[in-house]
Amino acid sequence: MLSVLLSCAFTALSLGGLVLVSTRIIDQTRAQIAADAAALGAVYGGEPAAQEIALRNGAQLMSSATQDNGVQSVQVRVGRQYATANARDSWAQQLPTMSP
């Protein structure tokens, strides 16, 4: 009888641990997907588009910035997981420079 109870307790603890780990992995994946989509949205629609896309993907936009070279950087959060993504318009004409 004691061995059955110990087996049940061990199984419950193991399953609880698996649930925590899998939730973390799922949230991290969802955050990265939302960050990628929000960064692409920011390229063409600015921060309002990034905010809308993040929300539609179940994420919260934490920050959005435009770098000097036209790269859009965003950070989003899903649950306790954060993800960052960068995007730029590769179809836009790049200004010529003096460097080779």
Image: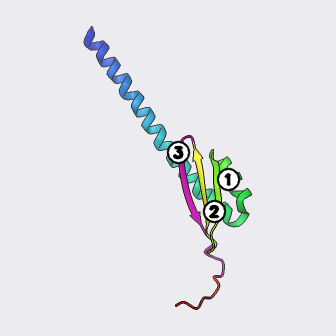
Q: Position of residue 10 (x, y in %)?
A: 32, 22
Name the amino acid, label 1.
Answer: Ile
Q: CA distance from mark 1 to mark 3?
A: 17 Å
Q: Are marks 2 and 3 in contact (CB under 8 Å)?
A: no
**Disc 3 secondary structure class:** strand
Q: CA distance from mark 2 to mark 1?
A: 9 Å
* Circle 1 Cα neighbour tier, 10 Å, few/some/many (<14 / 14–19 / ≥20): many
The residue under label 2 is: 40
Image quadrant where residue 67 sits: bottom right
The residue under label 3 is: 81
Give whichever of discs 2 and 1 has the lower sequence position. Answer: 2
Q: Nearer the viewer, mark 2 or mark 3?
A: 3
- In the picture, measured across the screen, residue 42 lies left or right of residue 79, that is right
Q: Position of residue 92 (x, y in %)?
A: 66, 77
Decide which of 73, 49 is in the foreground and name it: 73
Name the amino acid, label 2.
Answer: Leu
Q: Are marks 2 and 1 in contact (CB under 8 Å)?
A: yes
The residue under label 1 is: 53
Give whichever of discs 1 and 3 has the lower sequence position. Answer: 1
Q: CA distance from mark 2 to mark 3?
A: 20 Å
Give whichever of discs 2 and 3 has the lower sequence position. Answer: 2
Q: Which residues are magenta?
A: 79-93
Q: Position of residue 96 (x, y in %)?
A: 62, 88
Image quadrant where residue 98 sits: bottom right
Q: Quadrant of the N terminus?
A: top left
Residue at horizontal 65%, vertical 51%?
54
Q: Position of residue 78 (x, y in %)?
A: 57, 44
* Circle 3 Cα neighbour tier, 10 Å, few/some/many (<14 / 14–19 / ≥20): some
